[in-house]
Amino acid sequence: MVFLMKIGVIAIQGAVSEHIDALRRALTERGVEAEVVAIKQKGVVPECGGIVIPGGESTTLCRMLAREGIAEEIKDAVTREVPILGTCAGLIVLAKEGDEQVEKTSQELLGIMDTKVNRNAFGRQRDSFEAEFEVEILDSPFTGVFIRAPRIVSCGPEVRVLSRLDDLIIAAEQENVLALAFHPELTEDLRIHQYFLDKVFDC
Ligand code: GLN
C-alpha cells in the first residue's frame, strides 16, 4: 500500500474550504500527492504531517480546540516538529500571550509561539483591506487580504519576523510554526502555501 501524507485543516469554523482548496492546488502545482483532510474531532491530528489553523473567531476556536481535546494533540504535534500554519485567528490561537482584549475573554491560547498578539489590530476603518508587502521568504511582494486582522506585538528571540505592514508585525515563524495576520488562502498566489509544503515535505 502506498503511504499518502495527510495534511489537516482545523475545521471548527472559519475559512476552512479555502485553505483545503489552496493546499490541493499547491499540491497539484508541485506534482505531489497527499490527502488534505478537514479536522473536526480528536484523533486526526496525530495522523497529519502538517496542520493548518485557519481564520475565524479565535475565542470560539480556542474554546472548541480545548473542549474537543484537539489543543493537546496540536501541542504534541509541535514537539514532533510537525509544521503548523496559523492564519489570522490562527495566529492568535498559536500565541503565548494576548492583549487585554484576549485576556478579558479568557481565551486558552495554545502558547506554541513565543509571541504576544493584539486582536483587531488595524482599527475599525480598516476592518477589511488588501495590501502589498514584502515577505522575507519570498523574492517579490505578496498581496494579502486582511479581515479584522491581528498583529504580533512582540516576540521572543526564537521567533523570526518575516513581514511588517506599517511597521506592525504581520508574519513570523518559530522553527516549523508559521503565523500570518492575513489570509493567503483568499488569493490566487500559492507561494506561502508552497513554503508551508516545503516544510511538510522537508525540502
Ligand atoms: N478578529 C478575529 C479574532 O480575533 C480574527 C479575524 C479573522 O480570523 N479573520 O478572532
Image (cartoon, rainbow, N blue to C red):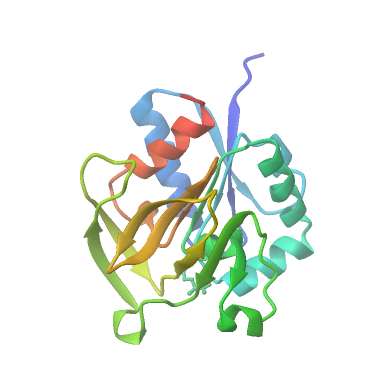
Q: State the image coordinates of residue 37 (x, y, percent, origin top left).
A: 59, 42
Nearer the observer, 105 or 100: 100
**Residue at the spot 41% in from the left edge and 76% down from the top edge:** 121
Q: State the image coordinates of residue 197 (x, y, percent, origin top left).
A: 46, 34
Nearer the observer, 133 or 73: 133
**Residue at the spot 51% in from the left edge and 51% down from the top edge:** 159
Q: Is residue 13 above or below residue 140?
A: below
Q: Is residue 132 left or right of residue 151?
A: left
Q: Is residue 179 left or right of residue 93?
A: left
Q: Is residue 184 above or below residue 43?
A: below
Q: State the image coordinates of residue 81 (x, y, percent, origin top left).
A: 64, 36
**Residue at the spot 70% in from the left edge and 66% down from the top edge:** 64
Q: State the image coordinates of residue 40 (x, y, percent, origin top left).
A: 67, 54
Q: Is residue 167 visible?
A: yes
Q: Is residue 171 left or right of residue 62?
A: left
**Residue at the spot 66% in from the left edge and 43% down from the top edge:** 78
Q: Is residue 182 visible?
A: no
Q: Quadrant of residue 58?
A: bottom right
Nearer the observer, 166 or 124: 166
The quadrant of the picture occupied by the N terminus is top right
- Looking at the rendered structure, the number of numbered marks drawn on it comes to 0
Q: Is residue 5 left or right of residue 132?
A: right
